[in-house]
Amino acid sequence: MSTDAAKQETTLDVGAQRVAAVYARALLAAAQKAGQVTQVLAELDSFVADVLDRFPRFEAVLSSAIIAHEDKEQLLDHTLGKQASPLLLNFLKVLSRHERLGVLRYVHKAMHELVTELRGLVRVRVSTASPLDEALAEQITAAVKGFTGGEPLLERRIDPDLIGGLVLQVGDTVYDGSVSAQLARLRTRMIDRSVYEIQSRRDRFGTGSGD
C-alpha cells in the first residue's frame, strides 16, 4: 500500500470512528431512557459475534451502498425480528436509512467504551511475555484503582515479543516496563551518544590549528 493510500485509509477510519461515536451516544441515551443498557449492549455483542463475524457476506450486504435501504430493512426484520429488542432493531434501521451500517463495528466499540465510562470502570490492558499470575494481577488492579479512583477492568494479552516485564495501558496512557522496550531505549541512547561523540570529534578537528 502506498503512503498516500495509507494516509487516506487512516483518514477514513478516523472519520468513521467519529461518526460511530455520535451514533453510539444516541444508542446509549435511548437505552438509558428505556432502562435497557445491559440488554442492548448484550444484543449488540451477540449481533456482531454471532452474525457479522460468522457471516461476512451478510455484513457485506448491509454495508453495500448499492443495495436499497428498504431491502436492508426487510433483511434486518427477517434476521433479527424475533431475537432483537425493538430498540436495537430500530437503531439498526436508522443506521441503514442514513447509509451508516458500514460503521456498525465502530459503533459497537464506541458503545462499550461509553458503557465502561458510565459504570465507573477503567479499561486496563496488561501485555506480558507469559501468562499473568493472579498475585500480580491483583497488585496491578489495586494500583490502578488507587491512582484512577475507578474500578479497573483488566484485559490480559500475551505478547512474546516483550521478552520480559509488562506493558500497562490505562486508557490512552501506556506504561512500558518491558525488557524489549528498555533495550530499545538503551540502543537509542547508545546511538545518540555515538552521534554526539562523532560530532564532537569533527568539531574539534574543524577548529584545531594546523601548520
Image (spheres, rainbow, N blue to C red):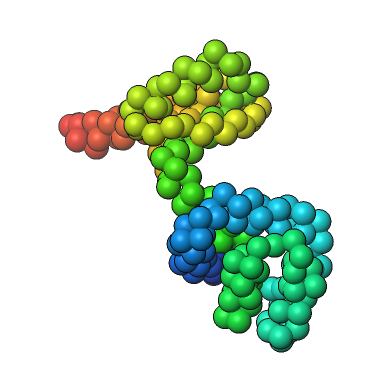
Q: Residue at x 53, y 24 (%)?
A: 166
Farthest front residue? 34
Q: How many numbered marks have been drawn onto this rendered protein structure?
A: 0
User: Which quarter of the image is occupied by the N terminus?
Assistant: bottom right
Q: Residue at x 62, y 60 (%)?
A: 105
In the displayed structure, 97 sits above or below 195; it is below
Front-most of 102 and 84? 84
**Which quadrant would residue 91 be assigned to in this image?**
bottom right
In the displayed structure, 112 sits above or below 61; it is above
Q: Can the viewer see residue 17 in this picture?
A: no
Q: How far across and how far down the image is residue 34, in percent?
A: 51, 60
Front-most of 106 and 83? 83
Q: How far across and how far down the image is residue 209, in percent?
A: 18, 32
Q: How far across and how far down the image is residue 82, in percent?
A: 76, 65
Front-most of 145 and 204? 145
Farthest top residue? 135
User: Which quarter of the image is occupied by the C terminus?
Assistant: top left
In the displayed structure, 149 sits above or below 50; it is above
Q: Is residue 55 left or right of residue 18?
A: right
Q: Is residue 151 left or right of residue 72?
A: left
